[in-house]
């Protein structure tokens, strides 16, 4: 029996309020996985956009509003 089929059988025996808890947990896991994927994607794109030859800026490089 597959894990999905086992889960379906277990869910069939639970009251609705407990099924709702399982659903909320499954959504949380899905959201965490998606956030992790987007974070990894963003880090990859950032690394591609900026290479080792980029200048290093310090606070001394910042100028007050209006100055150039």
Image (cartoon, grey):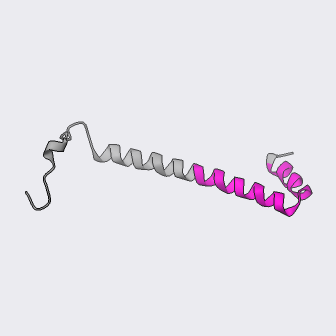
Q: From which residue to which does the magenta span run? A: 4-32
Question: Depth check: 61 or 55 in front?
Answer: 61
Left or right of 35 in this view: 56: left
Q: Residue 37: where, in percent of width, then height?
A: 51, 49
Question: Depth check: 28 or 54 in front?
Answer: 28
Vertical relation: 38 (above or below) 57:
below
* Dominant secondary structure of the residues highlighted in magenta in the image: helix
Left or right of 41 in this view: 32: right
Q: Residue 66: where, in percent of width, then height?
A: 10, 62
| Quadrant in the rendering for residue 22 | bottom right
**Residue 24 colored magenta?**
yes
**Residue 61 colored magenta?**
no
Q: Residue 25: where, in percent of width, then height?
A: 71, 53
Quarter in which the C terminus is drawn: bottom left
Left or right of 22 in this view: 60: left
Residue at the image position 13 percent from the left and 55 percent from the top: 64
């Amino acid at each position: 029996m597959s894990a999905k089929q086992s889960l379906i059988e277990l869910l069939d025996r639970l009251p609705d309020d407990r099924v709702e808890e399982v659903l909320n947990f499954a959504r949380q896991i899905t959201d965490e996985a998606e956030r992790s994927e987007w974070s990894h994607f963003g880090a990859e794109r950032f690394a591609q956009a900026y290479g080792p030859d980029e200048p290093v800026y310090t606070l001394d490089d910042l100028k007050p509003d209006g100055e150039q």
